[in-house]
Image (cartoon, rainbow, N blue to C red):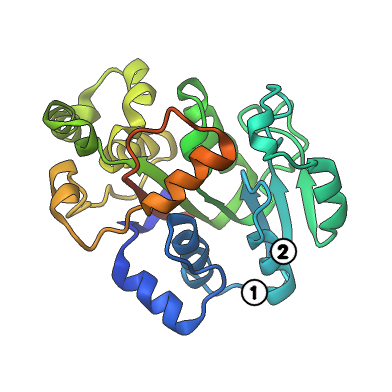
Amino acid sequence: MHKVKEVSLADTARLFDYLQCGVFGAKFKLKGFEYAWTIRAREWKPGERVLDVGAGYSALPSYLADTFGCEVWAVDDFGMSAQQDFWKRARDPHKFVEQTQQVKYILERLGDPDESSLPLEYFDVICSSSALEHVPDQAIQSVWRHMDLLLKPGGEMLHAIDLKFQGDRGFSYLLLAGILDLFYRWFPSKWKSRYARATPRCYVYMIADILGFDKVPSMHGMNSIEMVLDPEILIEPPETTYNRIIKDNAIDIRYHRTAALLLHLIKAS
């Protein structure tokens, strides 16, 4: 069972505050918001054991280790287990890991506790930024269950998951998203992973089924139609999408509007 401390969408007001206060990582893009939100969401303490899921080449793990004195681990296989060179970003992951001595990197994927080298009920905090949206449909539930097993009782999860605006794809997709928001909780379990990323509400409902929440939050303002109408919701700048097309050769990107779903959970003691 988990207590829900926060379920929200990244917004411009908080980003402006992070920028004015000089919070580490704050920039005019979703990942910049997510780094700053992760730092500001709680009081970090020396010696806390932290796991950053899907960290890649992120500077956040090193920052948490150097600034707060946390024992920081990062789990990411940089696409190597599936021979996906895309996630290497034309860099050498092994060389990066060797140079980042203050963080303990585990080059594997989550989802199978029996095959993992990560210790169970070890971590005080498990976090991620722009990572969990890349988990394949069939692995979403196993990845979340694995993270739950890794987290200590009383530990916290801080996850920022990037999700698309269905309205970008036209009225029919927006209408479908609205229907999913209303009826997703009653879908057969075999369909839930398939449609989990369709809307923020769907994703939250799925996690509530997996982990068990003390109560499911109201998620006011997170309806798919309300998302389209709300100017305060932070979206990924077009420049960031264009850079991905150029840098990563992601030529299939057509719809760039993306929001960040923020989940702050506390595991029951």
Label at residue 45: 1
The mark lying in front, picked from 2 and 1, is: 2
Cβ–Cβ under 8 Å for marks 2 and 1: no
Q: Is residue 110 left or right of residue 181?
A: right
Q: Is residue 196 left or right of residue 230?
A: right
- Quarter residue 43 falls in: bottom right
Q: For the residue carrying disc 2, how many other residues have a C-alpha within 10 Å: few (<14), some (14-19), or many (20+)?
A: many
Tell me which numbered mark, 2 or 1, is placed earlier along the sequence. 1
Q: Does dot 2 land on a helix, a strand or a loop?
A: helix
Relative to 156, is 243 above or below? above
Relative to 54, is 180 above or below? above
Relative to 249, is 121 above or below? below
Question: Which of 256/233 is in front?
Answer: 256
* Residue sitting at the far front: 246
Query: Looking at the picture, how far across and down is residue 36, in whole percent?
Result: 50, 68
Query: Looking at the picture, how far across and down is residue 138, in whole percent?
Result: 48, 20
Q: How many marks?
A: 2
For the point 64% across and 74% down, the residue is 45
Quarter of the image containing the N terminus?
top left
Query: Looking at the picture, how far across and down is residue 109, in whole percent?
Result: 67, 32
Q: Does dot 1 land on a helix, a strand or a loop?
A: loop
Q: Is residue 9 visible?
A: yes
* Residue type indicated by callout 1: Lys
Alpha-carbon distance for marks 2 and 1? 15 Å
Q: Mark 2 highlights which residue?
A: 62
Question: Which of 1/229 is in front?
Answer: 229
Q: Is residue 216 left or right of residue 213?
A: left
For the point 68% across and 68% down, the residue is 63
Q: For the residue carrying disc 1, how many other residues have a C-alpha within 10 Å: few (<14), some (14-19), or many (20+)?
A: few
For the point 50% across and 47% down, the residue is 243
* Residue type indicated by callout 2: Ser
